[in-house]
Amino acid sequence: PLNKSVSAELEMQVAVHEIGHALVASLLEPAYQEVVQRVTITPTSNGAGGLTFFAPRRNDGAQGTIATRTDLQQKLVVLLGGRAAEEVMFSMDFVSLGASHDIQEAERIARMMVRSGGMTENMGSPRISANLAGPRVADAVDSDAQWFVSSAYSEALELLQRHKATLIELAERLAVEKSIPGAVVRRSARVAAAKSDTKVEAVTATIVNSTSSRPSSEE
């Protein structure tokens, strides 16, 4: 029936989106400051089609941490992982509005980094708050914030394109089971990263061997 077909397509799109967040976060471990706890595509009372639940990573008993530039940049990458996953799976023509809140939150964090943290693209002089300056400074803040968001999106895309097979495998499982533990995603991310590292090492070894066995031009 058409309704079941449409429902299945929507569930798969939501599953891809949520796995995008969870897989990116897991691939950034252990540096990323939050751990995936659970991923679900069960609709919530507030209208969300799916959710990825995170918990703060324990930090040797520390009561709290101060977010660094790196922490915030990784937060942006994870926030944009859902939209990036949709593009990797369905192409830009079929991305949804499901990432609208993620994009708004990413823009808010990027602006905070520039305005409140003085974190600029080239790590030069801190920007003066746009609220206290003229349009030229406001434009500069917009430019720096956009650079952070664009860079984060590019990184999310690169990670998910490299590990597309794992993205597909996890999304298909989530679409069937509706909810999966974060441990499943983290384990799959570790396996995928290990395979990727092994391929890089194999290619490097092949290049080294072919170079060392090449006849010398002086012979």
Image (cartoon, rainbow, N blue to C red):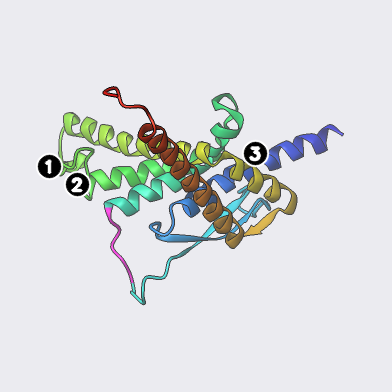
Quadrant location of residue 217? top left
Question: Could you say which disc has been placed on residue 13 in the image?
Answer: 3
Provide the major secondary structure of the magenta segment.
loop
Q: Tell me which residue sits at (61%, 41%) in the image.
A: 165
Q: Do the residues labelled 2 and 3 touch (CB within 8 Å)?
A: no
Residue 105 visible in this rendered orientation of the protein: no
From which residue to which does the magenta span run?
64-68
Circle nearer the N terminus (3, 1): 3
Q: Mark 2 to mark 1: distance in Å?
A: 7 Å
Q: Are marks 3 and 1 in contact (CB under 8 Å)?
A: no
The spot of residue 160 in percent (x, y) is: 51, 40
Where disc 1 sits, the SS reads loop
| Image quadrant occupied by the N terminus | top right
**180 versus 94 height, above or below:** below
The residue at which mark 1 appears reads as 125
Q: Do the residues labelled 2 and 1 touch (CB within 8 Å)?
A: yes
Q: Label 3: few (<14), some or many (≥20) within 10 Å?
A: many
Residue 189 visible in this rendered orientation of the protein: yes
The spot of residue 134 in percent (x, y) is: 16, 32
Q: Is residue 200 highlighted in magenta?
A: no
Q: Tell me which residue sits at (34%, 51%) in the image.
A: 72
Q: Mark 2 to mark 3: distance in Å?
A: 37 Å
Q: Mark 3 to mark 1: distance in Å?
A: 42 Å
Between 2 and 34, which is closer to the camera in this rendering?
Answer: 34
> Tag 3: residue type?
Gln
Where disc 3 sits, the SS reads helix
Where disc 2 sits, the SS reads loop
Quadrant location of residue 38? bottom right
